[in-house]
Image (spheres, helix red, strand yellow):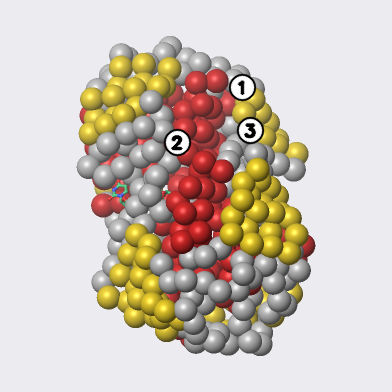
Amino acid sequence: MEKILVRPNGPLKGSVRISGAKNAALPILAATILGTEKIVLEDVPELKDVEIITEVLRGLGLKIEKDKNTLIIDPSGLNSYETDYELMSKMRASFLVMGPLLARLSKAYNSLPGGCNIGTRPIDLHLKGFNALGAEITMTHGEIKAEADELVGERIYLDFPSVGATENIMMAAVLAKGETTLENCAMEPEIVDLANFLNKMGAKVTGAGTSTIRIRGVEKLTGCTHQIIPDRIEAGTFMVAAAITGGDILIDNVITSHLKPVIAKLEEAGVSISTDGSAVRVIGNGKLKPIEIKTLPHPGFPTDLQAQFMALLTQAEGQSSVIETVFENRFMHAEELKKMGANIKVIDREALITGRSKLYGSKVRATDLRAGAALILAALVSEGETEISDIYHIDRGYEKIEDKFKSLGSDIERIERKM
Ligand code: UD1
């Protein structure tokens, strides 16, 4: 089983280039089902999750060639509305093929998506949206079937601004008859990237990035070339790496407006930040002030950086608070950080972190993708060696993570070790 070993090696210094965003690449890959001509996607990160969705698409008849970070996709061979059960169970985001399949073939058969939260609740908003567009939904023995004679545009209000539901419904609506209005939808930058991609292929989507998206249905979508936006969560992770080690890192290939909540919170904690075009420079001076964080849908503080900030706040002088409002059960990393010496008290959806704690290298487990990143960050300032297991979670979302940390001066390696 592969593990990551980290030993402290002082402040991180240098520059790092951010990869294309996983959370933009996944829905855009799903949306290639909607195309009929050649699609070229650039800056697609080489990640486990991308591999999985690529396999899902191949299983549906799409032809995909890969040249490093460029994917060339021929969607014209789409010949199935049924996704592979094994692949679906590996990744929640594979459910994003449901909307495009429904739009193209009027049918989509899928198993319930994988991940830790298996059940009906986490996809109810997707299904409600498909239903509003005219699809009939049936669920039996873990299989979901959506079928429609014809999809017709509707006014749809989302009870919660779910990122996945916004994307899935948007993709289902692009070929529907008439206009769809999606209200209280998610406003994440990745949704804007998806809308831009769809529009390049001939869709008529307006308002992405605001809470109301309008989609005027068109007859068909064609093909295009599109570059995936930079990953704001990877960027935020390296910003925390500079802050926690008291380092100086130039983080390149970012869209600084996507990083506003991250920049604001790091500055509040006493970290120096300057931006210049598509780069952000983060300088930690070794002294961190405690702060309060509440995760919220965009443009609020991203839940995907909550764990990394919790690691950071173990090194702030005094008590910090982190409130998680987006996911019910996203504090598993707190237990792992405590094993390393952190002082964290979790009460319901709030974690109180009292610092500064001396951290010690320990055997810890990446309980999920961002939790894994948080453990690497904590390990950078822990005494002795940290051994992180279950790193397949980290590989789902961080491209070449050890190489990038190594280039900044980290003592980090991936090893094959028996349990
Ligand atoms: C996406 C991101 C993930 C990020 C999350 C929130 C991708 C591939 N993943 O996940 O990294 O952490 O946004 O920013 O883009 N919910 C329901 N019913 C639904 C759908 C969601 O109750 O039908 C709930 C979820 O259980 C959760 C909340 O809404 O509590 C947010 O989920 P959502 O925004 O849908 O996240 P994902 O799209 O799964």
**Residue hosting label 1:** 224
Can the viewer see residue 263 in this picture?
yes
Tag 1, which secondary structure?
strand
Q: Secondary structure at mark 2?
A: helix
Question: Which label was assigned to residue 191?
Answer: 2
User: Where 305 falls versus 1 (above or below)?
Assistant: above
Neighbor class of circle 2 (other Cα within 10 Å; few <14, some 14-19, many 20+) is many
First reached walking from the N terminus: tag 2 or tag 3: 2
Q: Quadrant of the C terminus?
A: bottom right
Task: Identify the residue under disc 3.
Answer: 227
Task: From this view, report whether residue 161 is shown above or below residue 219.
Answer: below
Q: Which mark is residue 14?
A: none
Is label 2 or label 1 in front? 2
Residue neighbourhood size for the residue with mark 1, other residues' Cα within 10 Å, grouped as few (<14), some (14–19), many (≥20): some
Tell me how many marks there are.
3
Residue located at (52% from left, 72% from top) = 288
Depth check, front residue: 339 or 175: 339
Name above or below for residue 314 compared with residue 328.
below
Q: Decide if residue 24 is on the left or right side of residue 145.
A: right
Q: Residue 219, percent across and down? A: 43, 12
In this view, the mark in front (3 or 1) = 3
Residue 304 horizontal/vertical position (percent):
46, 57
Residue type at numbered disc 2: Ile
Q: Amino acid at mark 1?
A: Cys
